[in-house]
Amino acid sequence: MSLPLLDLLLPQRCVGCGATGEPFCGPCLARLAEPARRPPAPRPAGLPDCWSAADYAGPVRRAVIAYKERAQVTLAAPLAEALACTVATALARAHPATSGFVLVPVPSARRTRRVRGHDPVGRLATRAARLLTAYGHRAAARAVLVPVRRVADQAGLDARRRAANLAGSLDVAGHLAPALPVVLVDDLVTTGATLSEAARALRSRGAEVLFAATVAATRRRS
């Protein structure tokens, strides 16, 4: 059976609101167009400036979960566009003199990546770098961060325990041009522990971390 016929028999529904027609409809997509600083509170030591496209709630939350956990990769396009817009906004407002930079995705644990069957943040970083280049920025994506030890499941851990769980868990492997600053990217910031650890690993190798950009941010206080 051809895909167009399948679409007629099984019309797409928006993951955000359930409306028929698109995987992520216009009104839900508009919720991803609110780039702003959204740092976690409390703020962990070493956390770079945090920017995100939206709050992690409602249609945005459902889209991130569908993309990341259910491998609905058609959502990579709108999520990457939101990420690129967030990076461009942060550059314009906080780092207008920056002429070139590298997007570095936060890696998933190897076992998590195997279970999901894809690399959600790596895909977003690659697509966002292409979009930013089209916007006129000198951008590239480099997946240079790698896990160097296993960590416990983060679910249910408070900010202090997350930080302790992640400490020393990442390192840099591969080439990272020291002259170009880094923008850390992830799908979500909760306590900031993961981004803090990623920034530590990059700074330990001499990288300048400009800020972190995510698709969404929680309003967690713990």
Image: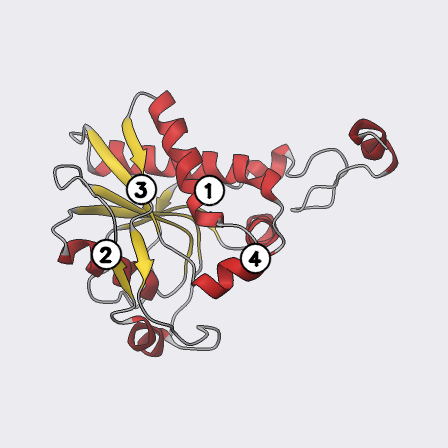
Q: Amino acid at mark 2?
A: Ala
Asked if residue 89 can be seen in this view, the reply is no
Q: Earlier in the sequence, mark 3 or mark 1?
A: 1
Q: Name the residue tied to disc 1.
A: 123
Residue 199's disc is 2
18 left or right of 134 in image: right
Q: Earlier in the sequence, mark 2 or mark 1?
A: 1
Residue 98 lies in quadrant: top left
What's the distance in space between the residues labelled 4 and 3, CA to CA?
A: 21 Å
Q: Amino acid at mark 1?
A: Arg
What's the distance in space between the residues labelled 4 and 1, CA to CA?
A: 13 Å
**Vertical placement of residue 196 versus 37, above or below:** below
Q: Secondary structure at mark 4?
A: helix
Q: Name the residue tied to disc 3.
A: 142
Mark 4 and mark 3 in contact? Answer it, CB < 8 Å.
Answer: no
Name the residue rendered at 55%, 53% in the picture. Answer: 68
Q: Amino acid at mark 3?
A: Arg
**Residue 7 location in percent, x, y?**
81, 33
**Vertical placement of residue 34 versus 117, above or below:** above
Q: Name the residue tied to disc 4.
A: 116
Name the residue rendered at 59%, 42% in the picture. Answer: 73
Q: Amino acid at mark 4?
A: Arg
Mark 3 and mark 2 in contact? Answer it, CB < 8 Å.
Answer: no
